[in-house]
Amino acid sequence: MSGNQQALARWAAHAVGEEASASGPEELCKLVEKLTGKAVQPPSPASAEDLVSAAFAAMEEAGLPAAALTCSPSEVAAGDKDALATLHWELAQAFLISQQFPGGGGQWKGAMLAWCQAACAPRGVTVTDFHRSWQSGMGFC
Protein backbone atom coordinates (compact mmCIF):
# COMPACT_ATOMS: atom_id res chain seq x y z
CA MET A 1 0.00 0.00 0.00
CA SER A 2 1.42 3.41 -0.98
CA GLY A 3 1.77 6.33 1.40
CA ASN A 4 -1.35 8.00 -0.01
CA GLN A 5 -3.38 4.81 0.25
CA GLN A 6 -2.30 4.27 3.86
CA ALA A 7 -3.02 7.87 4.83
CA LEU A 8 -6.48 7.85 3.26
CA ALA A 9 -7.29 4.48 4.84
CA ARG A 10 -6.21 5.82 8.25
CA TRP A 11 -8.34 8.94 7.74
CA ALA A 12 -11.35 6.80 6.81
CA ALA A 13 -10.80 4.58 9.87
CA HIS A 14 -10.57 7.64 12.09
CA ALA A 15 -13.74 9.08 10.54
CA VAL A 16 -15.74 5.99 11.51
CA GLY A 17 -14.02 5.48 14.87
CA GLU A 18 -12.14 2.31 13.94
CA GLU A 19 -8.69 1.35 15.18
CA ALA A 20 -7.52 -0.38 12.00
CA SER A 21 -7.30 0.98 8.47
CA ALA A 22 -10.70 1.31 6.82
CA SER A 23 -10.02 -0.62 3.68
CA GLY A 24 -12.80 -3.17 3.28
CA PRO A 25 -16.39 -3.07 2.08
CA GLU A 26 -17.80 -3.10 5.63
CA GLU A 27 -15.72 -0.07 6.59
CA LEU A 28 -16.74 1.68 3.37
CA CYS A 29 -20.40 1.23 4.34
CA LYS A 30 -19.73 2.76 7.77
CA LEU A 31 -17.84 5.68 6.22
CA VAL A 32 -20.58 6.39 3.68
CA GLU A 33 -23.22 6.28 6.43
CA LYS A 34 -21.22 8.66 8.59
CA LEU A 35 -20.48 11.15 5.80
CA THR A 36 -23.84 11.11 4.03
CA GLY A 37 -26.23 10.47 6.89
CA LYS A 38 -27.88 7.84 4.67
CA ALA A 39 -28.33 4.27 5.82
CA VAL A 40 -26.42 1.71 3.81
CA GLN A 41 -28.67 -1.32 3.61
CA PRO A 42 -27.11 -4.31 1.87
CA PRO A 43 -28.97 -7.61 1.69
CA SER A 44 -28.21 -10.19 4.33
CA PRO A 45 -25.98 -12.13 4.00
CA ALA A 46 -23.99 -9.69 1.90
CA SER A 47 -21.01 -10.28 -0.37
CA ALA A 48 -18.32 -7.65 -0.95
CA GLU A 49 -20.13 -6.69 -4.17
CA ASP A 50 -23.43 -6.30 -2.28
CA LEU A 51 -21.83 -4.08 0.36
CA VAL A 52 -20.10 -1.86 -2.18
CA SER A 53 -23.26 -1.60 -4.31
CA ALA A 54 -25.25 -0.55 -1.23
CA ALA A 55 -22.61 2.07 -0.36
CA PHE A 56 -22.68 3.46 -3.91
CA ALA A 57 -26.49 3.57 -3.79
CA ALA A 58 -26.36 5.59 -0.56
CA MET A 59 -23.82 7.98 -2.12
CA GLU A 60 -26.13 8.43 -5.09
CA GLU A 61 -29.09 9.09 -2.79
CA ALA A 62 -27.00 11.71 -0.97
CA GLY A 63 -26.26 13.54 -4.22
CA LEU A 64 -22.98 12.02 -5.36
CA PRO A 65 -23.74 10.15 -8.60
CA ALA A 66 -21.59 7.17 -9.47
CA ALA A 67 -20.94 8.81 -12.85
CA ALA A 68 -19.09 11.61 -11.02
CA LEU A 69 -16.65 9.15 -9.44
CA THR A 70 -13.40 8.02 -11.05
CA CYS A 71 -13.67 4.48 -9.75
CA SER A 72 -16.28 1.81 -10.21
CA PRO A 73 -18.04 -0.37 -7.66
CA SER A 74 -16.44 -3.45 -9.23
CA GLU A 75 -12.91 -2.02 -8.70
CA VAL A 76 -13.65 -1.26 -5.07
CA ALA A 77 -15.32 -4.65 -4.44
CA ALA A 78 -12.33 -6.39 -6.03
CA GLY A 79 -10.06 -4.76 -3.43
CA ASP A 80 -8.26 -2.33 -5.77
CA LYS A 81 -6.35 -0.17 -3.27
CA ASP A 82 -5.90 2.71 -5.72
CA ALA A 83 -9.64 2.76 -6.44
CA LEU A 84 -10.46 2.72 -2.73
CA ALA A 85 -8.00 5.54 -1.99
CA THR A 86 -9.52 7.56 -4.83
CA LEU A 87 -13.00 6.91 -3.48
CA HIS A 88 -11.96 8.01 0.02
CA TRP A 89 -10.62 11.27 -1.43
CA GLU A 90 -13.75 11.83 -3.53
CA LEU A 91 -15.95 11.23 -0.48
CA ALA A 92 -13.92 13.73 1.53
CA GLN A 93 -14.21 16.28 -1.29
CA ALA A 94 -17.96 15.80 -1.72
CA PHE A 95 -19.10 15.55 1.88
CA LEU A 96 -16.48 17.40 3.93
CA ILE A 97 -14.34 19.83 1.97
CA SER A 98 -16.83 21.28 -0.52
CA GLN A 99 -19.38 21.82 2.26
CA GLN A 100 -16.92 24.12 4.00
CA PHE A 101 -17.06 26.39 0.94
CA PRO A 102 -20.71 26.44 -0.20
CA GLY A 103 -21.31 28.20 -3.48
CA GLY A 104 -17.57 28.48 -3.99
CA GLY A 105 -17.71 27.07 -7.49
CA GLY A 106 -14.47 25.16 -7.01
CA GLN A 107 -12.66 28.00 -5.21
CA TRP A 108 -12.42 25.75 -2.18
CA LYS A 109 -9.33 24.14 -3.74
CA GLY A 110 -7.32 27.34 -3.37
CA ALA A 111 -8.49 27.80 0.19
CA MET A 112 -7.75 24.15 0.98
CA LEU A 113 -4.27 24.43 -0.56
CA ALA A 114 -3.53 27.52 1.55
CA TRP A 115 -4.69 25.70 4.68
CA CYS A 116 -2.56 22.64 3.84
CA GLN A 117 0.49 24.84 3.26
CA ALA A 118 -0.01 26.61 6.59
CA ALA A 119 -0.61 23.35 8.47
CA CYS A 120 2.34 21.50 6.93
CA ALA A 121 4.97 24.28 6.93
CA PRO A 122 5.76 24.06 10.68
CA ARG A 123 6.51 20.36 10.18
CA GLY A 124 8.97 21.08 7.38
CA VAL A 125 6.64 19.71 4.69
CA THR A 126 6.31 21.85 1.58
CA VAL A 127 2.98 21.60 -0.21
CA THR A 128 2.85 23.18 -3.66
CA ASP A 129 -0.14 21.45 -5.26
CA PHE A 130 -2.56 18.56 -4.87
CA HIS A 131 -0.59 16.23 -7.10
CA ARG A 132 3.16 15.98 -6.54
CA SER A 133 3.03 17.15 -2.93
CA TRP A 134 0.81 14.22 -2.01
CA GLN A 135 2.50 11.40 -3.92
CA SER A 136 4.86 10.61 -1.05
CA GLY A 137 2.08 10.85 1.51
CA MET A 138 3.96 13.58 3.42
CA GLY A 139 1.17 16.09 2.82
CA PHE A 140 -1.06 13.96 5.02
CA CYS A 141 1.29 14.19 8.02
Image: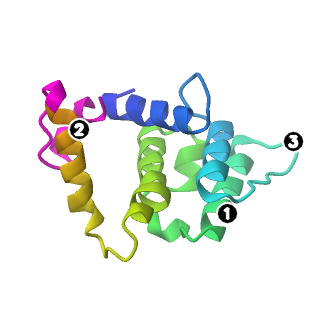
Q: Is residue 77 left or right of residue 26?
A: left
Q: On the image, which quarter does residue 106 sit in?
A: bottom left
Q: CA distance from mark 1 to mark 3?
A: 18 Å
How far across and how far down the image is residue 8, in percent? 42, 37
In terms of sequence position, does the residue under pointer 2 or pointer 1 come before the other? 1
Read off the residue under disc 2: 119
**Circle 2 SS class:** helix
Read off the residue under disc 1: 57
State the quadrant of the C terminus.
top left
In terms of sequence position, does the residue under pointer 2 or pointer 3 come before the other? 3
State the quadrant of the N terminus.
top left
Residue 114, compared with residue 12, is above or below; it is: below
List the single residue furthest toward the top: 19
Residue 18 is inside the magenta segment: no
Residue 132 is inside the magenta segment: yes
Question: For the residue carrying disc 1, how many other residues have a C-alpha within 10 Å: few (<14), some (14-19), or many (20+)?
Answer: many
Q: Given the image, on which type of amino acid does mark 3 rest?
A: Pro
In terms of sequence position, does the residue under pointer 1 or pointer 3 come before the other? 3
**Circle 1 SS class:** helix
Please state which of the two labelled residues, at mark 2 or mark 3, is closer to the viewer: 2
Residue nearer the viewer, 62 or 77? 62
Please state which of the two labelled residues, at mark 2 or mark 1, is closer to the viewer: 2
- Please tell me which residue is depicted at 24% across the width and 35% down the height of the picture: 139
Magenta range: 122-141
Read off the residue under disc 3: 45
Q: Is residue 105 left or right of residue 67?
A: left
Q: CA distance from mark 2 to mark 1?
A: 35 Å
